[in-house]
Amino acid sequence: MAILPAQSALLESLPQRKTNDWRDEFHTNGYVVIKSAIPEDRARAYQQEAFKWLKSFGTELDIESPDTWTKQNLPIQSKINTFHNYAVMHEKFFWEARQEPGVLEAFSKLWGTDELLVSFDSLNVTFPNRKDVPRKATWQHVDQSPFRKGLHCVQGIINLSHAGPEDGGLMVYPGSHKLFERFFETQTDKSTWSKKDLYLFSDAQLEWYGIQPHKVCAEPGDLILWDSRLIHYGAEPTEKSDVIRTVIYASYTPASLASKEALETKAEIFKQWGGTTHWPHDNIVPREKRAFREDGTPDPKNREEPLNKPEITDQLLKLAGVLAY
């Protein structure tokens, strides 16, 4: 987790720069919605590819029939409606969405460099009003360790579906990133800190912040960016929603922030078609490749590689940390 002086200078200077564009909103609120980063027709096409992937497991899943939105017809999901097994993060449509010009341009503009790494993150497909699973509890959190000071990671959602007030989507606590260091220094004991880039908040701790949560609304093709110090969580759709939330999580950071060891680990995970955390350049922790059923046994439908492999280009290999810039 050591930061070199040059890296530290970059991380500290970004929030201080006045740009008179959406970057000012990002640094002020801790998040921003970049409209139409991907043309709407392509975003909807990626959503259809995600649905095809879901149906490729040979079940009776019918996207048009809510009665089929059940556990037995879906690959195994995490507690937050995400798929991060089955090598989904390396499917062709996944990599094509990650390399959309508007997505890359946004992160390049924010970081001030075209030399980026991308996370091997998850797919989220949330079916509304499912009868076979209980509503999930909210888990307000940040994705940065208190041992890290300042801006280190910018997370992203490539939005492939409508996200209105009643639909599943991202909830944020605007401006909470600015209180990140003060909170940990005054409201916690340093002996309880972890180097893991995740911290869950209690209701009492959220009261200390005194910030009301805000639902981030977006349309297919919009890109949502947020500071990893920003308190956030994924909202379940209300009973009024009929939208199948479909998003790709994709975070990008400068390749210059990665150590040699991190790049080597990242490259090895890529070669194994594996997944990682939200972090592209550090905290390169491989996810479990196999999915497990509730009884602890491996899913017989597990996959070791993508069903439809991406086109391996120099750009892809650089984003994956395999090829140097």
Image: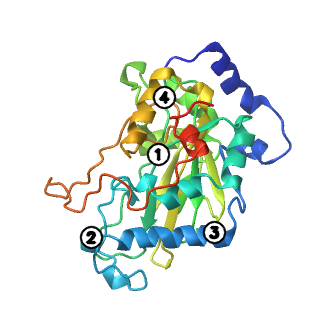
Q: Is residue 121 left or right of residue 287?
A: right
- Rendered-image quadrant of the C terminus: top right
> In the rendering, at what x and y percent does residue 149 appear?
57, 24
Mark 1 vs 4, N-terminal side: 1
Residue drawn 48% across the image and 28% down it: 263
Whether residue 154 is visible here, answered yes or no, is no
Whether residue 188 is visible here, answered yes or no, is yes
Q: CA gap, disc 1 to disc 4?
A: 13 Å
Residue bearing the label numbered 2: 71
Residue bearing the label numbered 3: 42
Q: Nearer the viewer, mark 4 or mark 2?
A: 4
User: Which disc is residue 263 wearing?
Assistant: 4
> In the rendering, at what x and y percent does residue 306 appear?
38, 56
Q: CA gap, disc 4 to disc 2?
A: 36 Å
Residue type (three-letter) at the residue carrying disc 1: Phe
Residue bearing the label numbered 1: 120
Mark 3 vs 4, N-terminal side: 3
